[in-house]
Amino acid sequence: MKKLPNVAKRKVVMVCDTMNEIDDQFAIAYALGSPLLEVLAVVSSHNTLVHGHDSVNIYKDEAQRVVDLCQRSDVPCLKGASRPMEDIDECLPSEGLDFIVNLAKQGVEFSILGTGPATDLAAFKLGYPDLAKKVPIIWAGSFPDEATWKKYKYGELNARADIAAWRVLYRNHENLVVLPGWPGVVKVAVENGVFLPELRSKNKAILNFLAEILEKWGHGKIKMDMDSNRPTKVLWDIVNIAYYTIPDAVITREMPIPEIDSAGSMYWDRTVGKIPVCMDVDEVAIMKDFWAAMERLPN
């Protein structure tokens, strides 16, 4: 069992590529509805692989839309880096990075929940290494082992969207926890035929919005994410929230992490350390906690 500090609420900064898919929107709403988290800001990183040079602006607007629907005017939505790093030494500036650095300099105890490319996380590690060592980073991305990498390497966008940033995270892995999509997180999948009516039955603006984007995603984009003959969608990024709100449901194991080259190849015969890696989840418990958070959101 993970032992968390005895505090009323854990302060977090979310770093998301909101609207790359739709799971960031669910994760933001989940975090804002949880009684165990205090969201200090939502920073929108780029994902130029998906939405090109304007992605950071698209994602910031979408994050703001979710925050507004949750009626949380106290939570700022900020821009992160607008593009990937060109090499492992480039520290890209952004207003999101400035916010994170100022929090750390003020001695605020907080964590970063990264559900997109690691560019802003790497900038923090590169530009402010002493501060960054003190801030836990929970990042959704990468792979737990060579077999998983070989099988899914072209389907994992967070790492591939900024390989240099991924390399920086692994080289500077103090206080880093990684939640790969496979084999655990992928289990948090919803079946549209059941989940959409449940969302709409609550008659809340934010849940109606989440239902709308899930339904739109399903037209031509949805895939069979699990072994099922019915349309499902994995809500990947909500597991970052559950890591703190229901920690026993996110099972991690100390795993070796390998060197990564500039093309994103992982060298498992050359490891750089060990970090906690998510290997399994209790998807039933996570979804129960998600629904409890949704009940707390305003109509």
Image: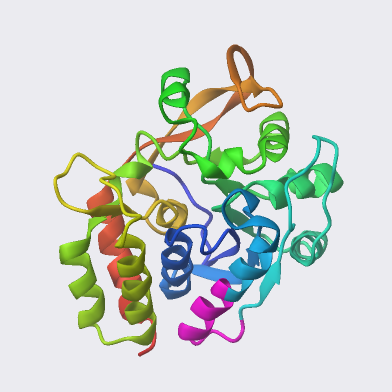
Horizontally, residue 33 falls left or right of residue 77, namely left
* Residue range of the region highlighted in magenta in the rendering: 62-74
Q: Is residue 6 visible?
A: yes
Q: Is residue 41 visible?
A: no
Q: Residue 134 location in percent, x, y?
A: 72, 47
Point 42% across, 19% down: residue:
147
Near-viewer residue (139 or 233): 233
Point 67% across, 60% down: residue:
109
Q: Residue 136 location in percent, x, y?
A: 63, 48
Near-viewer residue (47 or 145): 47
Q: Is the magenta stretch mostly helix, strand or loop?
A: helix
Horizontally, residue 79 falls left or right of residue 190, namely right
On screen, residue 216 above or below 5:
below
Q: Residue 32 location in percent, x, y?
A: 47, 73
On screen, residue 29 above or below 151:
below
Q: In which quarter of the image is residue 108?
A: bottom right
Query: Where's the C terminus, which quadrant?
Result: bottom left
Point 70% across, 71% down: residue:
78
On screen, residue 194 above or below 62:
above
